[in-house]
Image (spheres, grey):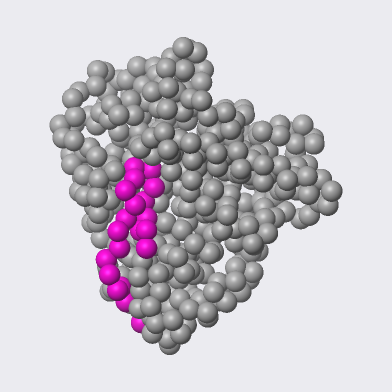
């Protein structure tokens, strides 16, 4: 099906879109067919049923290798400005996330056992103790930046503990993660490219040193498990680096973002905050609603390995689809009153964790972090108020407030 001209301009880096992407998404969902986005050479998919079908369809892999010939792959790499980035190409452009089929399955097996619900639940006491110390330190502050003073400190510490990264290194790893992830957005300037490439090299050197340490002195952590997998021939050194890098990056930014947007949602819907305070048993559904309402990773793409039908139309092999999870999770055909934040929403079949073979491994850990943080906050503070409306990141691929100024009153 030939792409139609876009009926209106889509600017995901604008301040207007950052303030309210959902009005734009609603206009897209109301259209017949998919929305062309020539800047990234793709068609944007906004309806929940279409996005859900694509992520579950093995004919629509994450990467175009094996679909496009070598010349077309190189052309698209240059078009996307992902060329001339040797470290980025080795460790970021290739990863468990950016692979399919047998390679993806082999790499996923090496880390899956560390992310089962039972093993993650076993981390609760340690996370609760750490979060309690952080929040106790804020009890007399009066006003805080929820993002900088609390949210940024938890996910990195927790995922770092699982991997075996020292606490002192977590701030550096967060900075590296942000420097790498920023290049997956629409703005791919020379400066942003150089930053992503240099950071990938630094990050790789750090992980090589961590690997050398585990070879000398193994520990009960995921880095040791990955080192053992490499020694057993289950992965290469490059795959060891890319897998550890991916887990550390995934464990940082998206959880920080959804913590910030989740708190903001509670403040925008104060009756829901009071409902949650009155019935703490709603916390699991409230956390799921935070992911639906403001999906922290609202965009991923897939490629058609053969002619496929999407939304009732046929698209040829090689078509690139941009999946707008943020739009799908506000689809009125799937969710009643989708722009209302509802801490008791059930069922809540959101797509914030993706689906199919690439369903997010870390979803149990992220939800546990959030459950503990919000439960501890409600026990510690009887009143939490918004000081000023936050600004959200200008981005297509991530969604979260840059800062969130709160006023706290201890219980």
The x, y position of residue 111, in whole percent, is 65, 45
Vertical side of 88 occupied by 388: above or below:
below
Main secondary structure type of the part rendered in magenta: loop
The x, y position of residue 333, in whole percent, is 25, 45
Q: Is residue 234 left or right of residue 217?
A: left
Q: Is residue 369 left or right of residue 280?
A: right
Q: Residue furthest right?
A: 216
Residue interval drawn in magenta: 382-403
Q: Looking at the image, which is closer to me, 40 or 187?
A: 187
The x, y position of residue 87, in whole percent, is 58, 32
Q: Looking at the image, which is closer to me, 139 or 231?
A: 139
Q: Residue at x 40, y 69 (%)?
A: 145
The x, y position of residue 374, in whole percent, is 45, 71
Specify the quadrant of the image occupied by residue 147. bottom left
Does residue 196 appear in the picture of this structure?
A: yes
Does residue 346 appear in the picture of this structure?
A: no
Q: Looking at the image, which is closer to me, 185 or 44?
A: 185
Vertical side of 167 occupied by 87: above or below:
above
- Is residue 391 shown in magenta? yes
Q: What is the tally of numbered marks visible in this picture? A: 0
Quadrant, the N terminus: top left
Q: Residue furthest left?
A: 7
Q: Residue at x 33, y 25 (%)?
A: 41
Vertical side of 343 occupied by 186: above or below:
above
Q: Is residue 298 left or right of residue 86?
A: left
Q: Residue at x 63, y 71 (%)?
A: 125
Q: Residue at x 38, y 23 (%)?
A: 79
Quadrant, the C terminus: bottom left
Specify the quadrant of the image occupied by residue 288. bottom left
């Amino acid at each position: 099906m030939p792409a139609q001209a876009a009926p209106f301009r889509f600017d995901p880096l604008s301040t207007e879109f950052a303030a309210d992407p959902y009005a734009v998404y609603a206009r897209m969902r109301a259209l017949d067919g998919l929305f062309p986005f020539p800047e990234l050479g793709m068609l944007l998919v906004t309806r929940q049923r279409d996005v859900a079908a694509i992520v579950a369809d093995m004919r629509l892999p994450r990467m175009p290798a094996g679909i496009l010939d070598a010349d077309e792959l190189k052309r698209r790499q240059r078009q996307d400005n992902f060329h001339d980035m040797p470290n980025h190409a080795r460790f970021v452009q290739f990863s468990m996330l950016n692979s399919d089929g047998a390679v993806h399955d082999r790499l996923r097996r090496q880390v899956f056992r560390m992310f089962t619900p039972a093993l993650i639940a076993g981390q609760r006491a340690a996370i609760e103790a750490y979060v309690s110390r952080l929040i106790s330190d804020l009890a007399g502050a009066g006003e805080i930046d929820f993002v900088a003073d609390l949210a940024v400190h938890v996910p990195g510490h927790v995922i770092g503990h699982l991997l075996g990264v020292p606490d002192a290194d977590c701030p550096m790893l967060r900075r590296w993660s942000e420097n790498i992830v920023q290049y997956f957005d629409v703005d791919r300037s020379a400066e942003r490219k150089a930053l992503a490439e240099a950071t990938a090299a630094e990050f790789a050197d750090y992980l090589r040193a961590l690997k050398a340490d585990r070879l000398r002195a193994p520990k009960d952590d995921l880095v040791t498990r990955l080192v053992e997998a490499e020694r057993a021939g289950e992965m290469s050194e490059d795959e060891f680096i890319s897998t550890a890098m991916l887990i550390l990056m995934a464990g940082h930014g998206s959880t920080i973002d959804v913590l910030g947007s989740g708190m903001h949602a509670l403040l925008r819907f104060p009756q829901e905050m009071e409902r949650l305070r009155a019935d703490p048993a709603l916390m699991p559904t409230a956390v799921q609603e935070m992911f639906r309402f403001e999906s922290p990773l609202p965009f991923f793409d897939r490629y058609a390995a053969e002619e496929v039908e999407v939304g009732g139309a046929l698209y040829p092999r090689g078509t690139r689809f941009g999946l707008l999870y943020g739009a799908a999770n506000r689809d009125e055909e799937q969710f009643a009153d989708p722009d209302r934040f509802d801490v008791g929403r059930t069922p809540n079949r959101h797509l914030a964790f993706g689906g199919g073979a690439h369903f997010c491994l870390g979803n149990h850990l992220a939800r546990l972090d959030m459950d503990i943080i919000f439960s501890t906050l409600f026990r510690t503070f009887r009143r939490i108020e918004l000081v000023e409306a936050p600004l959200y990141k200008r981005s297509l691929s991530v969604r979260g407030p840059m800062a969130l100024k709160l006023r706290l009153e201890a219980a």
